Image (tube, rainbow, N blue to C red):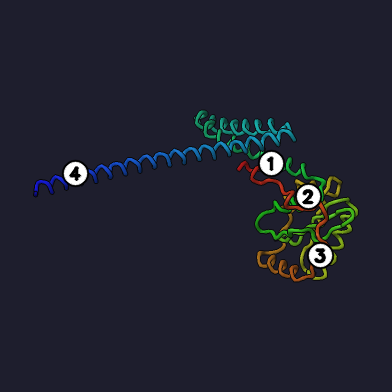
Amino acid sequence: MAEQKSSGASKASKKDIKNIKAEQKARRKAEKVEAKERKKAAKSKKRGFFKQIGDVFKMTRKYDPSVVWWMIGAFVAALVVGLVIGLLTGSPVLWTLMFIPLGLLAAIIIMNKKAEKAAFAQIEGRPGAAGAALSQLGRGWVIEDEPIAVNPRTQETVFRAIGKAGVVLVADGEYHRAKRLAEKQRKHMERFLPNVEIRVVQVGKGPNEVELHEVKPTIKRMKKALNRHEVRAVEQRISSLPKNNLGIPKGVDPYRMRPDRKAMRGR
């Protein structure tokens, strides 16, 4: 009787061991499948990154074929700098190899600059393009989602940004009409902000105008007149003023026209 119980226990023990081994085998198999999926996803993401870089390059080259030579020039210039430093230090090969990544980085920076210009060229002349340019200012600037003034008939617009340079009004459209619209807004705001610098930037290609792709660097170069707390105070003061409920004319939507920043950065 005891021998039968011992035999039954032994069989049960062997069965448990087999089950444990089967579970371990299934777990290892699942882990391998999961690792393979992660690796596949990583490769797919990597291919997507390079595909985006390729798409940006194709778009930029279509707009400006000289981008190829600018990129090659930037890369070669970096290698020349590395070679010169190497010759001076006695390690030309080492320094040249070290400057290869810098050359690639310089080429990508050139491409991004050209791509940004190409992206703005695609929306230049369309209503609301000035809002798309302002959207590139980034942190430190409070930008209105909609134009603060609009000519409903001819679709001249005025957008507003508030930052350390003060208040910047960006007018877009036919020069004289847009200028009158912006000056009217500037005089109106001066009544409520007498000690704040209010500047007007006119978008266009004329002698007194700023091209669309130059709006961001032009504003960035402006002399700082406010600190962070003063910017916040000016924003609150402006937000308390009566709103101009003209609405946006058909076709004026800066968010739909905003250049693709991820594509320009190759992300």
Q: Distance between the residues labelled 3 and 4?
A: 85 Å
Q: In this view, does 40 lie to the left or right of 26?
A: right
The amino acid at mark 1 is: Lys
- Number of numbered discs visible in the structure rendering: 4
Please report whichever mark, 2 or 3, sits nearer to the chain's N-terminal start: 2
Name the mark nearer the viewer: 2 or 1.
2
Name the mark nearer the viewer: 2 or 3.
3
Q: In which quarter of the image is the C terminus?
A: top right
Where residue 218 sits in the image (x, y, percent)? 75, 51
The amino acid at mark 2 is: Ala
Is 185 drawn above or below residue 94 in the view shown? below
Cβ atoms under marks 4 and 1 closer than 8 Å: no
The crowding category of the residue bearing disc 1, from other C-alpha atoms within 10 Å (few below 14, some 14 to 19, many at least 20), is: some
Please report whichever mark, 4 or 2, sits nearer to the chain's N-terminal start: 4
Please report whichever mark, 1 or 3, sits nearer to the chain's N-terminal start: 1
Query: What residue is shown with label 1?
Result: 113
Is 237 drawn above or below residue 128 in the view shown? below
Query: What residue is shown with label 2?
Result: 129
Name the mark nearer the viewer: 3 or 4.
4
User: Element under label 4?
Assistant: helix
Name the mark nearer the viewer: 1 or 3.
3
Query: What residue is shown with label 3?
Result: 245
